[in-house]
């Protein structure tokens, strides 16, 4: 059945109008002007971290406005191509118009998902922690597979990442890993990945070739900013230092530079060993601890609001996604029902379909 271009183009224009109203190009333009003024300050690079943040935000805002303004022209181009193909009854041009329409609809869908990221911390950088769960050496290997998957996802999007801490397992894989994703809206985007991830496969560590089910937990928190002012009294923090080590127990350095920071009231523990000095590891650990306390405070406030409203809606549950490699191959999100048969592509960082579906699902849950 041929594509009804008239209806599809009308739908695209309606979607674009809604996106434009939410994103507010005038507000983005004002933000660009403010950031441009900050970026032109002669003392900008006196604080390299702050300068990097300003230039990154400016680049993102400029790109966002450019994509938004260009979208209307893209819709016009597809409409013109479709009309020409229909008038000339040209099969090749018609096929090209259908491909362009599909690409346009995909771009609009991604832009529409961006408008759903309006939580208090959604625009922040993200700190992601992956921990192996039940399943022994297979679970440790699974945690390392997830680490690679998310780092590849960030790489495909051009997002900067920084591994903050890695705890290697004895035989293979990792016990845990923590890394930053530095990009606008990284937290809002990745927050739907939080939960328990389940892998079913023939174990490469079982000489009898039996099927093994493994679990790993993914935690996503917003990166703390200086303006958040999460004050932690020194009396509430216990700091232990130890020697950094890598796979096989080999020494990474010869000094006690690694830091383990414990927040005594909550029992939250943060370890950092990937920086070169104890001072750097301590600062990184404190920043992640502050981020986790910020998220904890946010969750407590949300729980109180739900209790006052009488909302007894269940939380996400233990297993939010299954990755099956045997007896068939499929990755399926148990919340959204989104599924993909190409498991290799998913493990190589092709997660946008799952993330977009998760963001839409979360918005629907919030509205119920």
Image (cartoon, rainbow, N blue to C red):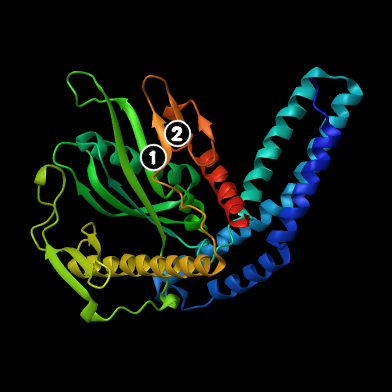
Quadrant including the N terminus: top right
- Residue 206 position within the rendered picture, expressed as x and y whole percent measured from the top left: 19, 24
- Residue 220 position within the rendered picture, expressed as x and y whole percent measured from the top left: 40, 55
Quadrant including the C terminus: bottom right
Q: Nearer the viewer, residue 176 or 65?
A: 176
**Can the viewer see residue 213 in this picture?**
yes
Tell me: 300 left or right of 144: right
- Residue 320 position within the rendered picture, expressed as x and y whole percent measured from the top left: 43, 42
Q: Nearer the viewer, residue 118 or 39?
A: 118
> Secondary structure beneath disc 2?
helix
> Secondary structure beneath disc 1?
helix
Crowdedness of circle 1 by 10 Å Cα count: few (<14), some, many (20+)? Answer: some
Tell me: 289 left or right of 335: left
Q: Is residue 52 above or below residue 320?
A: below
Say if mark 1 contacts mark 2, CB within 8 Å.
Answer: yes
Reading the image, the residue beneath label 1 is 149
Reading the image, the residue beneath label 2 is 346
Tell me: 341 left or right of 169: right
Total numbered badges shown on the rendered structure: 2
Residue sitting at x 26%, y 38% = 139
- Residue 71 position within the rendered picture, expressed as x and y whole percent measured from the top left: 73, 48
Q: Nearer the viewer, residue 312 or 296?
A: 312
Residue sitting at x 11%, y 61% = 242
């Amino acid at each position: 059945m041929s594509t009804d271009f008239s209806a599809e183009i009308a739908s695209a224009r309606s979607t674009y109008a809604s996106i434009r109203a939410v994103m507010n190009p005038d507000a983005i333009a004002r933000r660009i002007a403010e950031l441009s003024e900050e970026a032109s300050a002669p003392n900008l690079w006196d604080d390299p971290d702050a300068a990097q943040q300003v230039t990154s935000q400016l680049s993102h805002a400029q790109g966002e406005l450019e994509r938004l303004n260009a979208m209307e022209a893209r819709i016009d181009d597809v409409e013109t191509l479709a009309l020409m193909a229909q008038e000339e009854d040209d099969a090749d041009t018609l096929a090209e118009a259908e491909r362009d329409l599909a690409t346009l609809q995909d771009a609009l869908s991604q832009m529409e998902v961006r408008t759903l990221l309006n939580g208090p911390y959604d625009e922040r950088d993200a700190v992601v922690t992956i921990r192996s769960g039940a399943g022994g050496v297979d679970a440790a290997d699974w945690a390392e597979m997830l680490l690679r998957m998310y780092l590849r996802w960030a790489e495909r999007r051009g997002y900067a990442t920084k591994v903050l801490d890695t705890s290697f397992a004895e035989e293979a894989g990792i016990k845990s890993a923590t890394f930053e994703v530095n990009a606008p809206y990284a937290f809002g985007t990745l927050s739907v990945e939080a939960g328990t991830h389940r892998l079913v496969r023939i174990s490469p560590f079982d000489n009898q070739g039996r099927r093994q089910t493994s679990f790993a937990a993914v935690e996503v928190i917003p990166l703390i900013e200086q303006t958040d002012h999460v004050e932690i009294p020194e009396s509430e923090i216990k700091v232990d230092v130890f020697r950094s080590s890598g796979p096989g127990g080999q020494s990474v350095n010869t000094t006690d530079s690694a830091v383990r920071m414990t927040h005594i009231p909550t029992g939250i523990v943060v370890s950092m060993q990937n920086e070169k000095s104890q001072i750097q590891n301590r600062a990184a650990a404190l920043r992640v601890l502050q981020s986790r306390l910020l998220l904890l405070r946010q969750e407590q406030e949300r729980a109180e609001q739900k209790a006052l409203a009488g909302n007894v809606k269940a939380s996400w549950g233990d297993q939010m996604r299954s990755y099956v490699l045997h007896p068939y191959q499929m990755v399926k999100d148990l919340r959204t029902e989104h599924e993909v048969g190409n498991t290799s592509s998913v493990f190589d960082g092709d997660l946008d379909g799952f993330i977009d579906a998760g963001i839409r699902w979360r918005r629907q849950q919030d509205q119920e």
